[in-house]
Image: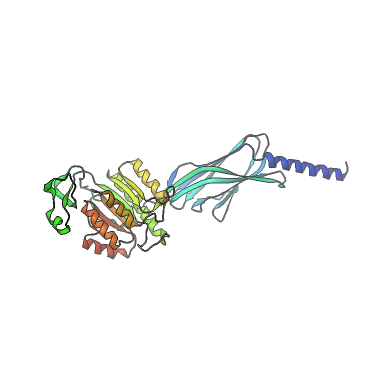
Amino acid sequence: MSVQWFIFITVVIVMIQGLVFRKWGLKNLKYHRYFNVPAVFEGQEVEMVEVISNEKLLPVPWLRIESKISANLKFQKQFNLDIQHQQFHKSLFSLMPYTRIIRRHKVKCLKRGCYYLNSVTMTCGDLFGFQEVSKEFQLSAQLLVYPKLIPMEDIPLPSHSWQGDVTVKRWIVDDPFMVAGVRDYAYDDPLNRINWKATARTGKIKVNNLDFTANPRLMIYLNVDISEEMWNAVTEPERIEKGISYVASIAQHIISRGIEVGFGSNGYLIDRPGEPVRILPRCSLEHLTTIYEALAKLVIARSVTFFTFLEQDLARGVTGMDFLIITSYVSPRMENQIRKLKEYGNAVEFLWLHPQQDIRSEEHEESGIGVS
């Protein structure tokens, strides 16, 4: 056979195998990616598992799987894993007929959040690299990274009943000897509850709001606004991240003591954009997980102003609640709402997110804003 015929046949074979791999290379390829656990805390490690199978007679000489993964998920270095710009990941495979490969990656979770792995791009080619074909595959992998827990002694908490060794029992049976503020008169209120001094001062009929005698309920509110003048962008997200860790740590501590706790914020969850967060108080490990999940999904951006957020509580007539407000500031409008919350029989205290607010906190305590 002449050299020309050899070259011609070689070119034909190369072209045919190139067309074969281009047409059938990605056929019957199955790919699955998942994390070995659904959630971890910030700073912990998790394992990401890749499973790929070639369910056909044709081998796959090389297969490249590309995806974009957050830089907050730090992968350990592997010879078959290429990471560019800390977020573009490439995995290389070679598959014989009817084979399956399982590959495991150690991942360190650097930051709280909700991480989705929605899609990957598969690219395969022929034996000589002359032909290649790509296709995008949809995935549904998700990882929740809970905020880092902080020791309670490192949180500048105000002094209150749910902190101490002895919990004040209240809020099931009315106690006529314990008055917790005043509120507007309702049609079914007895006349002996009318507070005549408050009625004369306000010009409206006010009645005593009686305290109760059962377990307290704590509602932790996180204000994602740095100041009242702030627009949409939060200029100091790390400050709010500290507040998120405060919420997780306090909720864990409170539930461990058998006290009901809830969570609210004027931010929003990544899967519920534009909607303020409110989780009503309960006491169980399942409820604590619900709070952790909400904190992992919380977006540090305003859904409504904190003034509007508090106004919604006033509109619902919330009563008999302990509020711990984690905030960077308290505006005059918020002070007015807080006074109204207290008139409804609620207790309100603050945990400040800015060191300069320590002086401001003392001023509020002296004026009665920061003390239940």
Residue at x 35% of width, y 52% of height: 265
Nearer the observer, 139 or 42: 139
Nearer the observer, 291 or 179: 179
Taking the image as shown, residue 51 lies to the left or right of residue 339, namely right
The spot of residue 131 in percent (x, y) is 71, 46
Look at the picture and state if 87 lies above or below 61. below
Q: To which quarter of the image does residue 341 belong?
A: bottom left
Quadrant into which the C terminus falls: bottom left
Residue at x 25% of width, y 54% of height: 348
Taking the image as shown, residue 276 lies to the left or right of residue 130, namely left
The spot of residue 137 in percent (x, y) is 58, 43
Residue at x 79% of width, y 42% of height: 12
Quadrant into which the N terminus falls: top right
The spot of residue 141 in percent (x, y) is 50, 43
The spot of residue 363 in percent (x, y) is 24, 64
According to the image, what is the colour scheme of the structure? Answer: rainbow
Nearer the observer, 40 or 325: 325
Taking the image as shown, residue 325 lies to the left or right of residue 77, namely left
From where the camera sits, is residue 194 visible? yes
Q: How many marks?
A: 0
From where the camera sits, is residue 154 visible? no
Residue at x 34% of width, y 50% of height: 264
